Image: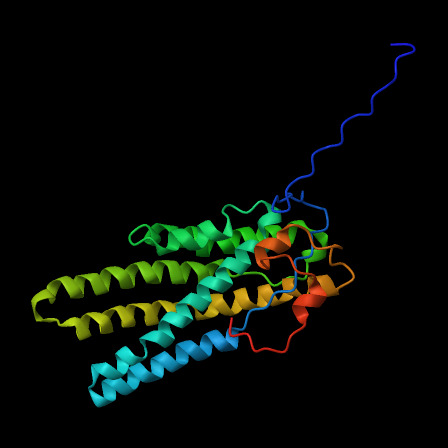
């Protein structure tokens, strides 16, 4: 009304730091915080456990194979960490699932037989779609959906094979035999994952160096909090000379 003082419009409520903005196709993708993945460490853990298992068969001593179980479990946990990072890197591209959900549902016995196709094969589809949709990601490594499906289908077949053997040998097996059977199952799945894990690590390292390129997309977005908890600046995260085994 004339003569009345005009009140300023209220400022928009800022989004929380954890809110994630979906970047439309064709626009530059936000550069995540620096993040790395070591395929050598993962493969070394797997190789160490396999060597111990081979020695156990040569020596006919199941205890040697069981001693390799911590290495194999570390290898599996390392793989889950890298899988979580890969999902976190493409969240701004409207990924089908969140990193925590992708990993958490893989830990549910029985349901993981289905969810593997979402968390592993689905990652290859979403990753390739995202890197193809943004101009500054055109040179990013692609994930081979074929190697992802080989792991998913192979894991399914191996699970039912081991289950069949276990049920038909129930009365003759002791705890060492059961532990060895589980170890063989995990080791075989890890072997099937080798090609795809190499691609994941290559993709993570490429995306992690995106902030150093001229087309990196500018200031890290809230996406970086999914990759690097705490959202520390790039310079701070690159500091520190400690050895990171993950």
The front one of 245 and 116 is 245
Residue 90's x, y, as percent?
59, 52
Residue at 45 percent of width and 66 percent of height: 79
Quarter of the picture containing the N terminus is top right
Q: Quadrant of residue 33?
A: bottom right
**Taking 162 as reference, is 69 above or below it?**
below
Of 213 and 127, which appears nearest the observer? 213
Q: Residue at x 36, y 56 (%)?
A: 107
* Residue 109 position in % (x across, y down): 29, 54
Picture residue at 16% right of the left edge, 65% below the top: 166
Q: Which image quadrant is residue 192 in?
A: bottom left
Residue 150 higher or lower than 46, as above or below? above
Vertical relation: 108 (above or below) 4: below
In the orientation shown, which residue stands out farthest toward the right? 3
Q: Is 18 in front, or is 166? A: 18
Indicate the position of residue 175 as horizontal and vertical percent values.
17, 71
Q: How is the image coloured?
A: rainbow
Q: Residue at x 91, y 10 (%)?
A: 2
How far across and down, in percent of the image, does residue 51 sit? 35, 84
Q: Is residue 20 left or right of residue 82?
A: right
Q: Is residue 175 left or right of residue 199?
A: left
């Amino acid at each position: 009304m004339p003569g009345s003082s005009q009140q300023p419009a209220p400022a928009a409520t800022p989004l929380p730091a954890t809110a994630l903005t979906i970047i439309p196709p064709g626009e530059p993708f936000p550069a995540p915080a620096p993040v790395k993945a070591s395929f050598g460490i993962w493969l070394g853990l797997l190789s160490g456990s396999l060597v111990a298992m081979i020695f156990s068969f040569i020596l006919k001593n199941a205890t040697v194979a069981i001693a390799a179980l911590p290495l194999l479990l570390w290898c599996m946990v390392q793989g889950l960490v890298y899988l979580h990072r890969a999902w976190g890197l493409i969240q701004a591209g409207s990924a089908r699932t969140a990193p925590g959900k992708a990993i958490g549902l893989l830990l549910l016995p029985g349901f993981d037989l289905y969810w593997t196709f979402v968390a592993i094969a689905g990652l290859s589809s979403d990753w390739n779609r995202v890197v193809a949709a943004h101009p500054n990601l055109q040179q990013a490594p692609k994930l081979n959906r074929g190697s992802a499906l080989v792991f998913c289908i192979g894991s399914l077949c191996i699970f039912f094979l081991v289950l069949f053997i276990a049920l038909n040998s129930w009365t003759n097996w002791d705890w060492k035999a059961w532990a060895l059977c589980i170890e063989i199952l995990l080791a075989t799945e890890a072997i099937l994952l080798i090609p795809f894990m190499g691609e994941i690590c290559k993709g993570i390292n490429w995306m992690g160096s995106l902030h150093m390129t001229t087309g990196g997309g500018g200031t890290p977005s809230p996406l970086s909090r999914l990759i690097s908890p705490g959202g520390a600046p790039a310079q701070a995260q690159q500091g520190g000379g400690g050895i990171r085994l993950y």
